[in-house]
Every structure is written in structure tokens, then in C-alpha cells.
Image: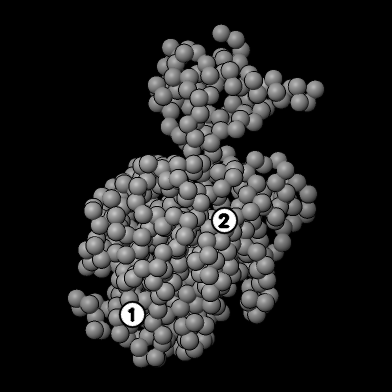
Amino acid sequence: MDDTAKKIIEILKKNMKEPSDDIGLATPLADLDIESLDLAVIVFDIEDTFGIEIPYNANEEVEDFATVGSVVDKVKSIIAETSSATA
Amino acid sequence: MTTKNGRRRVVVTGHGVVTPVGNDVPTFWSALKQGKCGIGQIQSFPTNELYITIAGEVKDFEPKERLPSKQFHYADRYSQFAGAAAKEAVEQSGMTTPLADEESYRAASIIGSGIGGLTTLELSYKALFQDHKRATHPLTLLKSIGSSAAAHVSIEYGIKGPCFGVVSACSTATHAIGLVYRMIREGLIDLGLAGASEASLAYGSTRAWQAMRVLSPDAILPFSKNRNGTVLAEGGGVMMLEELEHAKARGANILAELVGYGMTADAADMVNPSIDGASTAMQMALEDAGLSPGDIDYLNAHGTATTVNDVNETRAIKRVFGKAANDISISSTKSMHGHCLGGGGGIEASATIMAMKENIAPPTIGLDEPDPECDLDYTPKVGKAREITYAMSNSFAFGGLNAVLLFGPDPS
């Protein structure tokens, strides 16, 4: 697991009531007992950590937030977009 | 009938609004009937670093024209909205003001706000921390406090009885109106101005809302399959409430009777509403009025266009009204004026009174394709002419704070 994934899992754990140690890329977010307001806080934390903006709307079901791995992929793609836009 | 089941009756003798679709009741109501939308690109501050760039802004509001008293000229915009709405309500009521001494202590000014003079605070902090100004404006504190609108209104009209602000986020105005209703009913006062206003559209507060991820970047579409969040707005609504005999004695024109009020708290979650809380508040209002579900003709829904509210509210309505739910004309006028937060309930109560007066249910605009889980009659796209004798107005707020008003015809 790379650095980005590790940092994102740390952020998820920080915002969980009972953080578990067996969170992997395949873990669905739905299994982590994360509610909509938690997700807004998690997205904020990720944005702050990586210096990016994530277009997330709590009113929409988004595939990017299905599993831990899909969040990691989304963050990586935004980081790549952001750095190419500023390059 | 002076009293109903031995209790004092409360009537509406005036109402006033400031909204994104009109800065007085006639303009506002005409816009609602026409299905006009007051949402647009934000003009009052730069939005280039935001992805939420739309809101329902109040346009062409000239405080010095609407409010001749100097005290309002230095007030926060939220107090100015309340002042303008109160002025319209007082003028319509025909009440002689400032109130005479013996009456002044039997009158209330309960004007709330979700957050008070937030824009004043935001700009003061900007001046202090960003522009490194030496001091903030001397009126910063008086402008920002959440009780300043109530105080300004009491000063304007010589109201010397209960005077304070009420705070319950998006249920604020409804709680304020309900509170004055109960004070009159229980004999504490004979009349009162009640409502709320909000003017919190500013860069920092929009960023804060944006971070909650509940706003739509493009439109407010209550009950629609395509809804993707609410749209912030500003404005205010204030009513003149009076004890029935008091109104009759001075020959006032009675617009409606406030026949029922219900309030509950979900005691569950800050953002996810419960069916129990919402339905019990509606049930309480019905019981307070001694009415049956089949008596209600029009319901002004809270209808915020968030995924959770609209489904929850629909389920709550069905639980309370059963089969009769299908015969009620429901609408979310937020589709036109946006989510005026604390002020919303006052504005929507005005829409409800006008719906009764003209027997027209205003529409829910933009409702091309309803959510399959929202399957009631939300008066899609165009208003509907129908007999409206009793009408309900719902307000449900963050924190699970629910308040419901129920209006009926002039009893005299």
C-alpha cells in the first residue's frame, strides 16, 4: 500500500467511532459506519492533507466513494490533475 | 365565538416579507403565482474561489427608502429585512403606533434569526485579521447580536412587553410565530409581531455551507428525481398576531386565524431528520386546532430539495394524513425563493395565508420528474386554483427541530 492510501486510511480511522485495523483498499465505506456528516468531515480532511478540492455532494450517490480503494484512486487522479494544471 | 373550547383565539391582521422574488407581500405573491424563480448567480461578493456560485439574493432593497427611522440605517441587513417586513405587517394591520402605554406592555416583539448579523461579524474579522485595521466599527456588536432585530422592532413601534430573538436554524420564524400565538392564547399579551429574518450570504458563510456538501451547484428542485441539494437565500417574514376580540374591537381586517401549532425535536441526529419528529409536530398542530387530516387543503412543505428531507417529509405527511394525503395540494415555494433559513418559515407562512385568501396553491417549480419516493401532489410547475379553508406550513431544521403552523379562516 502506498503513502496516499496509508494517509487516507489514517484519516478514515481518525473519524471512526471504533477504528478497526483491517481496513484495506477493497473495504466498502458503507462497512465503516460512516454517516453523511462524517463523510463531509473526511473529505475536508483529505482536501486539507493533500491540498486538493474534491467535488463531493452528499445528495448524490457517487461511485468514487464506494470503497476505500475508489477514494484513493479519486484522490490520486485529482492530485495528478491539480499538478498538471499548475505545472 | 370569542373563545374556542374556552381559550382565547389568535388571528393574523398583517404580514410582511422581504424575499428574493419580491420585497413586499403583493410582489412576492404575484411572483409565486407566476412561478418566478429568484435564484441566480451571486452578485454581492466574489465567487471565483467557490464552486457554489448561486443563491437567492434579495434585490433592489433600499433600506433608507423602506425604513425611514434612522435606527435601521446602521443596522445589519438582517435587522433591516425584519424592520421592513414588520413595517408592512404593522401598516396592513392598521394598528396605531407607537402603541399607547397601557397596550405597550401587552405586546410582544419576537423576531428571530438563524444566526443574526453574521455578515457584520465576517466583515469585521476580515478588517481586523486580514486588513490589519486598528479596530472594528463601534456598532459591530449591536449589529451582530441575534436579538437586535427584535429590539429594533420594539423601539420602532413602542412594544414594551416580551421582546427577544428565537433561534432554531431553519425553523426560527415558525417557532417565533408559534411562541407569540401561545403567549396571546394564554393571556400574557394581546398582540405581537412575530417572525424572523436572515441575511447571511457572504463569502465565509457560503464556504462553510459548501463544506457541508448539502448545497446544489445549479438549482433547487424540491421533490424532483434530479434534486441535488438546497440553495441558500436571504429574506424575512413577520406577522402581526392579535387576540380575536382585540382585533374586532378596533375593526381590524382579519386575514386568517392561527388555529394550531406543533413543535417537536427529533433528539436523534444533527442532519438526518426523523419521520417521528416531523409527523408528531404536524399531528400536534392538527390536534391543537381540533381538525382532522381531511380538513387540510394546502400544505406549504419544508421541501429543501436535499435527498433526505424531501423523502422524510413525504413519509411523515403520509403517516399523519393517511389516504387524505393524496387530496392535499402541497408545494415547496423554496423552489422559487430558495432556502431563506431562519426567515423561511415567516415567508412561507405569508405564502400560506395568501394561498388561503386567493384559493390558489402556489406551485413547486422545476418539478418535471418527481422522485418515485415522493409521490404526493406537489403542485408541479404551475399553481392550482382550489378552495383552501385550512392550510399548514412546515419547518424542519438542522438538529431535528420541527415546528408546524396551521391557519384557518377569519372566525368573526
Residue sitting at x 30%, y 75%: B185
User: Which residue is farthest right?
Assistant: A87
* Quarter of the image with the N terminus of chain B in it: bottom left
* Side of B116 relative to B242 (left or right): right
In x, y percent, where is residue B196? 49, 65
Out of B147 and A59, give the one closest to the viewer.
A59
Q: Secondary structure at mark 1?
A: loop
Out of A46 and B157, give the one closest to the viewer.
A46
User: Are the residues tagged 2 and 1 within 8 Å (C-beta)?
Assistant: no
* Side of A57 relative to B268 (left or right): right
Can marks 2 and 1 be said to lie on one chain? yes
Out of B396 and B189, give the one closest to the viewer.
B396
Q: Which residue has dot 1 on it?
A: B410
Assess disc 1: are there few (<14), some (14-19) or many (≥20) residues with their C-alpha within 10 Å of its C-alpha: some
Out of B366 and B185, give the one closest to the viewer.
B366
Q: Which residue has dot 2 on it?
A: B233
In x, y percent, where is residue A64? 53, 24
Residue type for callout 1: Asp
Residue B324 in sight from this viewpoint: yes
Give the mark nearer the N terminus: 2 vs 1.
Answer: 2
- Output the chain of dot 2: B
- Output the chain of dot 1: B
Q: Indicate whether B110 appears above or below B313.
A: below
Q: Secondary structure at mark 2?
A: loop
Q: Indicate whether B35 appears above or below A17.
A: below
In x, y percent, where is residue B374? 37, 46
Q: Which quadrant would residue B102 be assigned to in this image?
A: bottom left
Residue type for callout 2: Ala
* Quarter of the image with the C terminus of chain B in it: bottom left
